[in-house]
Amino acid sequence: MTDQNFDGSNYKAGQKVQWDAVAEAWRKWWPEIERGAQVASNALADAIGAGPGQRILDVSTGIGEPAVTLSKRVGADGSILATDQSAGMLAVASERIASEGLSNIELVQVDTEELDLPENEFDGAVCRWGLMFLPDVQAGLQAIRRSLKPGAKFATTVWGTPPQTPMFSLPMAVAQQVLDPAPPTPPADAPNIFLLGAPGVLQSAFSAVGFNDVGGSDLQINFDLDSPRSFADFLGDIAPGIHAILSGRSTSEIEKFWNAVVTKAENLVDENGAFSIPGTAPFAVGTK
């Protein structure tokens, strides 16, 4: 069954609640997340030429990345403005920034589509895995572009198509197979983790709002965990979408779901017994 109508306002309100609810879990799993995701933060910083003295915008920073990576690139004479809609995620980011002794990052709670920043303010901008959750991607991109100085670059990563991202497609497939009733299919126009993952979609979105010299490639991201059971624990903690799918279901049905996820994930254990879940992250960069 498919929900017929998509309400962007209700969706955004729900997103805030869901991300606030998992913020503590993101603190818990931060080392495992960043062992894999640091590849993306480094690529974004490189793509915009982040360097000493620059002022850079980090949109959808979550619990502080790539803001922390960028902070070290721009140094004491530079600054980072990092935004997110979730107060809970930003609270964790603030703690991490303090623990690293960084003083050049400002955190602001704001919806990306509602960014109202000075025009021609930033030397570069980044967004790591945030654009695909926007109801109006074009509005978000336009707001980011306005804030850039002429000639400055914006770079972003999203997640690829379902076959390229088993971290997310695997549990979703299991949910359709074992949950009764199965989760409803979202409206076609609703934001989702695969929204911008098909080849060329991200670059086309950049070009549509006026970015020049648009380029891109795919990043390969691997998350190394102890076992398929650790993967299930990881997802159960950090993924708002999984929380929503399982909400209100019986204990036995939830247990059935997670056991099926573990069984499916065993296919990703290599011949040496190591478990790693791969992902493709389409990457794009454009110049104002």
Image (cartoon, grey):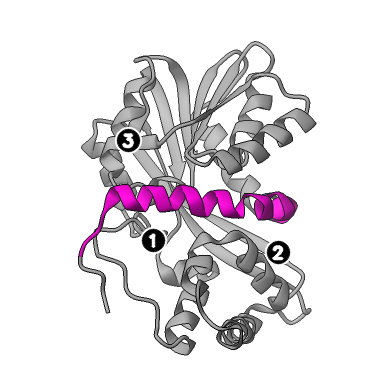
Q: Are marks 1 and 3 in contact (CB under 8 Å)?
A: no
Identify the residue shown where x is 52% and y is 75%.
171
Q: Which mark is first along the chain, 2 or 3?
A: 3
| Point 72% across, 66% down: residue | 225
Residue type marked 1: Phe
What span is in magenta?
5-32
Q: Nearer the viewer, mark 3 or mark 2?
A: 3
Q: How many labels sit on residues?
A: 3
Identify residue type, mark 2: Asp
Percent x, y for residue 188?
24, 64
Q: Which of the two labelled residues, at mark 1 and mark 2, occupies the earlier sequence position?
A: 1
Q: Which mark is residue 224?
A: 2
Position of 187 relative to 99 (above/below): below
**Residue 132: percent from left, percent from top:** 38, 51
Please tell me whether residue 22 belongs to the stretch shown in magenta.
Answer: yes
Q: Is residue 170 above or below residue 178?
A: above
| Residue type pointed to by label 3 | Leu
Residue under circle 1?
194
In the picture provided, is 133 more to the left or to the right than 61?
Answer: left
Q: Please identify the quadrant where the C terminus is shown.
A: top left
The residue indicated by pointer 3 is: 141
User: Tag on residue 167?
Assistant: none
